[in-house]
Image: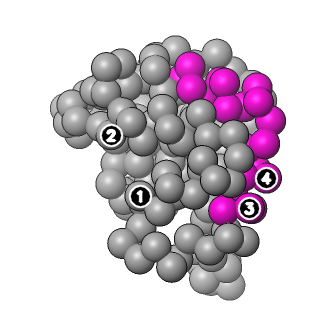
Amino acid sequence: LLHGFGSDSTAWHAVERALAPARPVLRMDLPGHGQSAPGDIRAFEELAAAVVEAFDALGLARVHLVGHSLGGAAALALAARRAGAVASLSLIAPGGLGNEINGDFIEGLAAADDTRSLAPWLRAMVCDDALVTADYVAAAMAARVAPDLRAEQGAMGRALFPGGTQDFDLKP
């Protein structure tokens, strides 16, 4: 399971709970997110290479990949490079399939440094604002409290999405 920009692997917790009784589930933190080692990702190709390297280190024979947003783009790149190891590919609003991106969201999410500034960006991702409770916002902020993490995500966002566009094309 590969999460989107500004999130981390814990975003998949409910999905993991639903799937885990039937099969093993792995959640990966993308570079510059969650518990991943800090990285200086300044191009999508660097992000893709890091995901492929992490995948290869696991030594898995065949997997079902699920990716959301930037995680969807990473899943596409992984599937292109390790097609024989991918049994299926499920993408939720994947990146890399067009030029358009919400640049304000990327910048705002990366810059949010407290619950008040983070909450509006989290609400922008759901159709029902009631889903974004105060507890949810607090948990999301706790995962991104480190200023270095936010700065790294901001730099990554500006590099991958310059001028509010996607700097990579995965349509081919």
Q: Residue at x 66, y 62 (%)?
A: 137
Q: Is residue 7 left or right of residue 143?
A: left
Residue 23, x across and y down, in percent: 63, 75
Which sits earlier in the primary sequence, circle 3 or circle 2? 2
How far apart marks 3 and 2 lie (CA) works out to 23 Å
Label pair 4/3, CB-CB below 8 angstroms: yes
- Can residue 84 be seen at all in this image of the molecule? no
Label pair 4/1, CB-CB below 8 angstroms: no
The three-letter code of the residue at mark 4 reads: Ala
- Specify the label residue 46 is tagged with: none
Q: To which residue does mark 3 refer?
A: 138
Label pair 2/1, CB-CB below 8 angstroms: yes
Which sits earlier in the primary sequence, circle 3 or circle 1? 1
Q: To which residue does mark 4 refer?
A: 142
Say what secondary structure mark 3 lies in.
helix
Bounds of the magenta segment? 137-156
Q: Total marks drawn?
A: 4
Q: To which residue does mark 1 refer?
A: 124
